[in-house]
Amino acid sequence: MMSPASGSRTPEALNPIGILDSGVGGLSVLRHIRELLPHEDLQYVADQAHVPYGSRPAAEISALSEGITRFLLSMDAKSVVVACNTASAAALDGLRETFPDLPIVGMEPAVKPGAVQTRQGRIGILATAGTFGSQRYAELMARYAHGVVAYEDPCTGLVGEIEAGRGNGPESERILRQALEPMLGAGVDTFILGCTHYPFALPLIRRLVGPEATIIDPAPAVARQVQRVLEQSKLTADRTRPGKTTLFTSADPQHLAAVAGQLLNEEFPVNAVTWREDGLYPLAGNDRS
């Protein structure tokens, strides 16, 4: 096992794609990458010791994201997907500067397609406070939200419910009703899921907003961008076997295995990692499936 890597390396096409998030939310991106690129190995880090990122300072999120990226590089990742809107807002530019040779794909709320698809000129954006308060989000709104009225809600507490496997439970319904009912009353017809956790509450969201509303999940578009980046860099895996998916968590592997299995209807090997002063490291002998 290598120590946390430096910012310069030459990735190989058969190496895994690294994916990071504060918790299970990025699994909503991982599932689309698996569908689109079924022969790629994926290594997913859930930093559940620090979930949620949405309430943390941007500098802390940047440091955590860099630490996870170095860990993924130590596991020979050929590219990294920042499958977290909050981490992308806080850390994406810095990661690209620190690791200039590493293909990095990030997330952002789908404001542009939302502004195009709304029929009434009113969009509702569900994202974390960290995303709403970021410069990246402000620039996104300034660029694409002309001519529309945007309503925002952080759905405080919803990430925690999804992390616990209760994304469609009664507390999640209370949180979402509080967020969505004022938007519906204001005539919002297009809803943007600006946190990767929130697609795991999609059945509940759909029931609350009704069949005529448009709901935009950016995860499929992110998966397509990952495919484009790998093809452009000639890093697509040339193999016939199905790709392998391995999960890592900085908290309880058994809990992640249970919730990931519930969310994706499949069992995955899960490994424990731990934060030290100089980075993120694996714990030996903790594989769970």
Image (cartoon, rainbow, N blue to C red):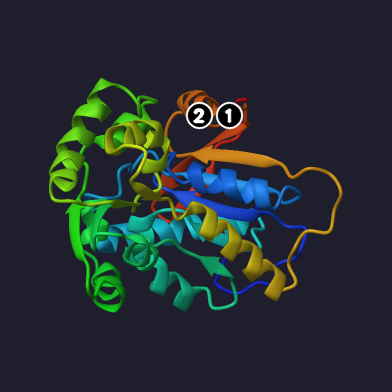
Classify residue 129 as left or right of residue 250: left
Asked which secondary structure carries label 1, the reply is loop
Left or right relative to 72: residue 161: left
Residue type pointed to by label 2: Pro
> From this viewpoint, is residue 42 visible?
no
User: In the picture shown, does residue 220 fall above or below 59?
Assistant: above
Q: Tell me, yes or no, whether the two marked residues, 2 and 1, touch with CB atoms within 8 Å.
A: yes
The residue located at (46%, 63%) in the rendering is 106
Q: Nearer the viewer, residue 269 or 266?
A: 266
Q: Which residue is mark 2?
A: 253
Q: Residue at x 20, y 61 (%)?
A: 150
Q: Residue at x 31, y 22 (%)?
A: 169
* Mark 2 / mark 1, whichever is N-terminal: 2
Q: Which residue is mark 1?
A: 286
**258 to 6, vertically: above or below:** above
Measured as percent of width and height from the top left, residue 225 is found at: 57, 65
Q: Quadrant of residue 90?
A: bottom left
Residue 15 visible in image: yes
